[in-house]
Amino acid sequence: VDLESEGKSDVDISTLNYIHTHKTGALLEASVVSGAMLAGASSDLLERLSQYAKNIGLAFQIVDDILDITATSEELGKTSGKDAQAQKVTYPSLWGIEKSKQESKALIEQAKAQLEGYEEAAKPLLAIADFITARSY
């Protein structure tokens, strides 16, 4: 769906969310949930971690889209502006930069809410969530 969407201007937010939930979100979900499964986590915790990972995955992508517009290639360590060159629909192209920032922060808050009750054990996951919206590369 991602490749099929390149160059198309009729991609809506539902399609964009589908793409990134099944790409970035799925990668993070597999990483987070598989570790918890191996540790013997309950089904409730696995579901909460799954939702956490999906939310940080979307937030990561939104921030990545913002940085592709606002950061330099030197800051990113990769070529900036590649999404525009590839004519990809991004969160900022649909929402603008400010709303995209607000949405990424809301997703991070929703992700962190999934970790309530696991304060000490959740510290690394909370730090990852905070890093995602604070990063500049």
Image: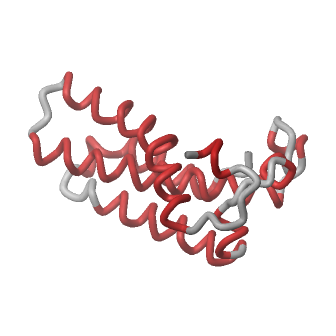
Q: Is residue 50 above or below residue 17?
A: above
Query: How many numbered marks appear?
Result: 0
- In-image side of 36 versus 87 (left or right): left
> Which one is nearer the viewer's eye here, 3 or 23?
3
- In-image side of 9 versus 48 (left or right): right
* Residue at 41%, 39% in the rendered image: 26
The colour scheme applied to this rendered structure is: secondary structure
Q: Is residue 60 above or below residue 91?
A: above
Q: Is residue 3 above or below residue 56?
A: above
> Which one is nearer the viewer's eye here, 18 or 120?
18
* Residue at 56%, 51% in the rendered image: 60
- Give coordinates of residue 7: x percent, y percent: 76, 54
- Give coordinates of residue 42: x percent, y percent: 9, 39
> Which one is nearer the viewer's eye here, 133 or 90?
90
* Residue at 62%, 70% in the rendered image: 100
Locate the C terminus and report the quarter of the image it occupies.
top right
Q: Is residue 35 above or below residue 101?
A: above
- In-image side of 132 versus 57 (left or right): right
- Give coordinates of residue 122: x percent, y percent: 30, 45
- Give coordinates of residue 44: x percent, y percent: 11, 48
> Which one is nearer the viewer's eye here, 126 or 12?
12
Asked where in the image residue 11 lies, by quadrant, the reply is bottom right
